[in-house]
C-alpha cells in the first residue's frame, strides 16, 4: 500500500492536490483493461478469460468496446494478458480500423502494469477514457464523464451494500477524489471509469517503482498532482461490476430491464415486454439478424389478418399478439448487441405501416 493510501486508510487528513486541474477536452481514445484472470468466475469460464463471458449476445470485452464506440470514441485500445490470443481475436475483428488489442507482458503484476502497456498507443492525445472490461454500463452512464473536460472519475455515491463491500472506495475532498482503496471506509466507490491525462502513465511508473502495480495506486498518485473530479453517476444510469456468477445474473437482469421504454403503454409494459425481453435475451446469442425478426413479425401479422378475415378469431388473435411481441424483439436484439441502425429502424417502420 502506498503512503497516500495508508494515510487515508487510517483516517488521517486527506492529501491536498498540489496543482490546478488541466483541460483535456472530450477524449478520442479509450483504453480497456482486459488482461486479468478471474478465479471467482471459474465455474462460468472453465478456466478461460472473463473478458469472453457472454451475456445478451456479446462477450464482456465486445460489450465494453461497442459501448465506447457508440459513445463516440474514435479509437479503442484493449490491453490483453491472460488468454491473450482468444481475447485479441475477438477484439481485432470488432472494427479493425478503430479497435486493436495490445499485449501487456507484465499483466500478472496488476492492472496498473496493464495500463502501462497502452502508453505507446496514446501518443498525441490530450487525455483518454479508461475502463475495465468487467464493468458494464448503461447507455447514459459514461456521458457526464466524457464531458468532464478535466481529469475525473465516475463515482457511485450510493452503492448497494454488496457493491460497496466489493468496490474500490474513494476519499473525496471538495468534490474531488484524492485516494482510492478497498481498505477505505468512505461511502462512495468508483465505477471503474476514468478520464485521465498522459501524466497518468508517469504516476503509474512511480507507484510501481514503490512496489504498487495496482490501478488504485496509480490514480491515487495522479490525484496528488492533479485534482481528479468526482463525477457522480447519473440518477437514471446504472453500472455493474462482474466478478461472480451472481454478478453475471444481476447484469443480465439489468440488461433485460433496460430494454423497456418510457413510451410503452400498459399492454406493452405488462404483457408484451415481459415476454419479448426474455425472448430477446435468449435469441441474442443466436446468429439471427434483427431484420429477419422484423420480417417474421410481419408474416405473423399477415397470417393473423387472414385468420381473422376467415372467421378464425382465436387463431387470428393469437397470431396478431405474437406479431406484436415479435415486433419488439427485433429492436431489443439490436440494442442488446449495440448494433441499432437507421436501416433497421426504417425497415421496421415500413413493415409496421404496411
Image (cartoon, helix red, strand yellow):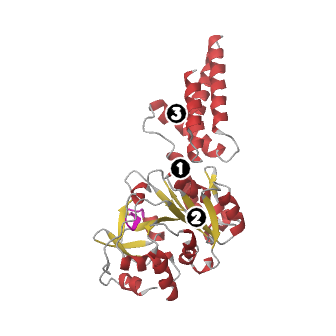
171 left or right, relative to 241: left
50 left or right, relative to 193: right
269 left or right, relative to 330: left
In whole angstroms, how far apart are the C-alphas of marks 2 and 3?
A: 42 Å
Q: How many marks?
A: 3
Please state the extent of the stretch shown in magenta in the rendering: 150-160
User: Which label was assigned to residue 195?
Assistant: none
- Residue shown at the point (31%, 80%) measured from the top left: 18
Q: In terms of image quadrants, where is residue 169?
A: bottom left
Q: Residues within 10 Å of mark 1 (few under 14, many from 20)?
A: many
When the figure is inspected, residue 292 is found, relative to residue 162, above or below; the finding is above
Q: Secondary structure at mark 1?
A: helix
Q: Position of residue 97 (x, y in %)?
A: 63, 56
Q: In terms of image quadrants, where is residue 181?
A: bottom left
Residue found farthest to the left: 174
In whole angstroms, how far apart are the C-alphas of marks 3 and 1?
A: 18 Å
* Label 2 vs 3, first from the N-terminus: 2
When the figure is inspected, residue 354 is found, relative to residue 210, above or below; the finding is above
* Label 3 vs 1, first from the N-terminus: 1
> Pointer 2 and pointer 3: residues touching (CB < 8 Å)?
no
Residue 162 is a magenta residue: no
In whole angstroms, how far apart are the C-alphas of marks 1 and 2?
A: 25 Å
Q: Nearer the viewer, residue 139 or 65?
A: 65
Is residue 252 shown to the viewer in this render? yes
Quadrant, the C terminus: top right
Instruction: Residue under label 3, please give it.
Output: 271
User: Which label was assigned to residue 255?
Assistant: 1
Q: Residues within 10 Å of mark 3 (few under 14, many from 20)?
A: few
Q: Secondary structure at mark 3?
A: helix
- Residue shown at the point (59%, 42%) measured from the top left: 334
Instruction: Residue under label 2, please give it.
Output: 77
Amino acid at each position: 500500500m502506498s503512503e497516500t493510501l495508508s494515510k487515508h486508510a487510517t483516517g488521517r487528513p486527506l492529501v491536498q492536490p498540489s496543482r490546478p486541474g488541466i483541460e483535456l477536452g472530450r477524449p478520442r481514445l479509450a483504453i480497456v483493461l482486459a488482461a486479468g484472470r478471474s478465479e471467482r468466475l471459474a465455474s462460468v469460464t472453465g478456466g478461460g478469460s472473463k473478458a469472453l463471458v457472454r451475456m445478451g449476445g456479446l462477450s464482456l470485452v465486445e460489450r465494453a468496446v461497442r459501448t465506447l464506440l457508440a459513445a463516440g470514441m474514435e479509437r479503442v485500445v484493449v490491453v490483453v494478458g491472460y488468454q491473450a490470443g482468444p481475447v485479441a481475436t475477438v477484439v481485432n475483428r470488432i472494427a479493425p480500423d478503430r479497435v486493436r488489442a495490445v499485449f501487456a507482458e507484465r499483466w500478472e503484476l496488476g492492472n496498473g502494469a496493464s495500463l502501462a502497456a497502452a502508453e505507446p498507443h496514446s501518443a498525441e492525445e490530450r487525455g483518454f477514457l479508461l475502463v475495465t472490461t468487467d464493468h458494464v454500463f448503461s447507455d447514459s452512464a459514461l456521458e457526464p464523464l466524457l464531458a468532464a473536460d478535466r481529469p475525473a472519475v465516475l463515482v457511485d455515491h450510493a452503492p448497494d451494500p454488496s457493491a460497496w463491500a466489493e468496490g474500490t472506495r474513494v476519499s473525496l475532498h471538495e468534490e474531488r477524489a484524492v485516494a482510492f482503496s478497498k481498505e477505505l471506509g468512505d461511502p462512495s466507490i468508483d465505477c471503474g471509469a476514468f478520464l485521465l491525462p498522459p501524466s497518468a502513465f508517469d504516476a503509474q511508473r512511480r507507484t510501481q517503482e514503490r512496489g504498487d502495480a495496482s490501478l488504485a495506486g496509480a490514480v491515487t498518485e495522479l490525484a496528488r498532482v492533479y485534482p481528479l473530479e468526482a463525477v457522480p453517476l447519473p440518477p437514471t444510469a446504472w453500472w455493474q461490476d462482474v466478478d461472480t456468477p451472481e454478478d453475471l445474473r444481476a447484469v443480465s437482469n439489468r440488461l433485460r430491464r433496460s430494454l423497456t421504454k418510457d413510451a410503452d403503454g400498459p399492454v406493452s409494459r405488462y404483457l408484451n415486454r415481459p415476454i419479448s425481453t426474455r425472448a430477446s435475451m435468449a435469441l441474442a446469442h443466436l446468429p439471427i439478424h434483427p431484420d429477419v425478426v422484423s420480417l417474421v413479425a410481419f408474416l405473423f401479422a399477415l397470417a393473423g389478418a387472414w385468420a381473422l378475415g376467415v372467421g378464425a378469431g382465436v387463431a387470428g388473435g393469437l397470431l396478431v399478439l405474437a406479431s406484436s411481441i415479435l415486433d419488439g424483439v427485433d429492436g431489443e436484439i439490436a440494442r442488446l448487441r449495440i448494433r441499432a441502425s437507421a436501416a433497421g429502424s426504417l425497415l421496421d417502420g415500413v413493415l409496421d405501416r404496411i
